[in-house]
Image (tube, helix red, strand yellow):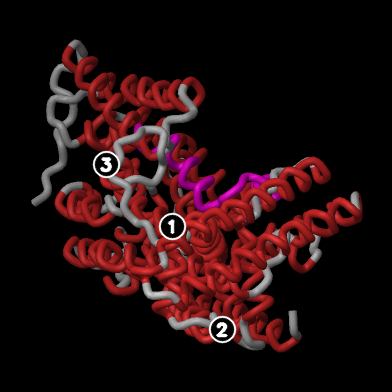
Amino acid sequence: MHWINWVVVIVYVAYIVTHSLRRAKGTNTVEGYFLGNRNIPWWAVGLTVMATQLSAITLIGTTGQGATDGMRFVQFYFGLPVAMVILGVTIVPYLHRAKVYTAYEFLEQRFGPVTRSFTALLFLCSRGLGAGVIISAPAVVFSAIFGWPIVLSVAVIGIPTVLYVVIGGVQAVTWADVKQMFVIVAALVAVVIVLLVKIPVSPDAALTVAGAAGRLKVFDFSFNLTETYTFWSGIIGGTFLMLSYFGTDQSQVQRYLTAKSVDEARSSHLMSAFWKIPLQALILLIGVLIFVYYLFIVPPLYWNPAHARAVEAADPSGYAQLEQNANAVWVQRNALAAEIASTPSDQAGRVREEFRVADAAYGAVRAEALVKAAEVTGQSSRDVNYVMPQFVLGALPIGLAGLFVAAVLAAAMSSIAGELAALSAATVIDFYKRWFKPEASDAHYVKVSRWATAGWGLLACGVAVYAASFGSLIEVVNRLGSFFYGSILGVFILAMIPRSRAPGAFFGLIIGMGSVAAVSYGAPSVSFLWHNVIGAVMVVASGLVISAFSHDAKGRQTPQQG
């Protein structure tokens, strides 16, 4: 990468860290460290909610998903607006008015300390692993493209992130999120402009070619439990996933607990409901346009340059033959793409069919090359996470490439920072303070919180080193969350049903997790989005049955909204 790009990266990251720390005031109290003294403006809360999701996984993995699979992934988010409206009238007012520090404190008011701790433990397991995957996304790409050892790549991202969260708490996280959101959106718009300029056909023609390749198909109305991205999995499974993520996951709950009032917390959620789907569609569209760009510009045989080097070193003649085969098919596909772009739509039926055949043939050559890479390296050869970085470094102008790399780093740091702040809060509030030292000064709890943040940061970096070969990281992080989210959501639903009891909640949670595990390992073809539905339904159903036979006669009262 050109030295000017490195200057842009270093200056931007230094600015993000130092300016965020300057804004981190009042972190010497527990409320200041974890919740920003509950005084963050609603628009900043809304941006930080979106920024926590818009991680480097999104910028790298989702664009790669768009390039290889098209726009179908956007169906994953169809349940988001529905979930945000439901949360705005249920969990958000309950938790905000309860003046809790974590979502799991609320569960103790209804079901006692055991259920609270068990649920918090599930959160720590899921988020601790998830934070490692978030670091892994940019780390593995930087390692492959720049030739860095994976440990160095992880350290470059993880160390400064842990540093500013340890010192600045949620205030530092929030104001870093605000700045990085503007930079990321600007970088995405700039990439779209560059693509439209560099693709040698008009925007309409580019979309026509993408459509011929099936990359613009958004809706799939088939009801198939084994298909991940369909309208029904998005609107049903996605709603359950988003309800759990935004309503019960401490990394999101902690955000709206920093808002000044219930109304401002609701407004911050609605911001994400309105803007998340268009933003995801833009990111996927960038991936689609990159696919079109490489129909006219010869793409690399391997998006992952480390695999290209390994295969070429192990079998030079085999590599040369694979490259020759890919180029031959690409030439044919390129000619057909150009013909589609210049032929009126109503006359391009034959050409479209020939193009689809050529596109499938190119995919077959690529599949053969990926099998070869897996044999040589002994690693997964799925390289969807390398499509966007290869385009950025190979096609973007000097300076803009540096800005995009800086945005990826900032996005990774911001998302990881949010996760670390949430993990620290749950560790200290739900375990250390609840079970080990219930009475201590704020200074003591803040000190322990900083150590907890550092510990979780170290664990996340360790996980990141081993998460490199998990395939599409945007899918990995959602698969991981879906294993836990539905069951956790079920407990919170039970908490708002007056006749539910503590034994029902505890044993229902165990049954829900067991059901998800049984489906995950016994019926692996069932899409992970349905795991959220299965977990929530099983917890609520079994919890209500057990509650009906429980000796916990009256239970605890459901907190009032007013």
What label sits on residue 97 in the rendered view?
none
Q: Are marks 1 and 2 in contact (CB under 8 Å)?
A: no
Q: Nearer the viewer, residue 234 or 149?
A: 234
Q: Earlier in the sequence, mark 1 or mark 2?
A: 2
Q: Which residue occupies 64% across, 74% down?
A: 297
Q: Is residue 305 left or right of residue 246?
A: right
Q: Which numbered mark, 1 or 3, is in the foreground of this view?
A: 1
Q: Residue at label 3?
A: 236
Look at label 3 and name its amino acid: Ile
Considering the whole magenta stretch, tell me its main secondary structure. Answer: helix
Q: Is residue 1 magenta?
A: no
**Element type at mark 3:** helix
Q: Residue furthest left?
A: 562
Percent across and percent down for residue 100 are 30, 50
Image quarter in which the N terminus is found? bottom right
Q: Residues within 10 Å of mark 1 (few under 14, many from 20)?
A: some
Q: Are marks 3 and 2 in contact (CB under 8 Å)?
A: no
Percent across and percent down for residue 479 are 48, 41
The boundaries of the magenta stretch are: 462-487
Q: Is residue 191 left or right of residue 230?
A: right
Q: Relative to residue 210, is residue 87 depicted above or below?
A: above
- Across the whole image, how many numbered discs are drawn on residues? 3
Q: Earlier in the sequence, mark 1 or mark 3?
A: 1
Q: Residue at label 2?
A: 198
- C-alpha span from label 1 to label 3: 25 Å
Is residue 3 something one can see in this rendering?
Answer: yes
Q: Which residue occupies 42% across, 21% down?
A: 514
Q: Residues within 10 Å of mark 3 (few under 14, many from 20)?
A: some
Q: Is residue 440 left or right of residue 559?
A: right
Is residue 306 something one can see in this rendering?
Answer: no
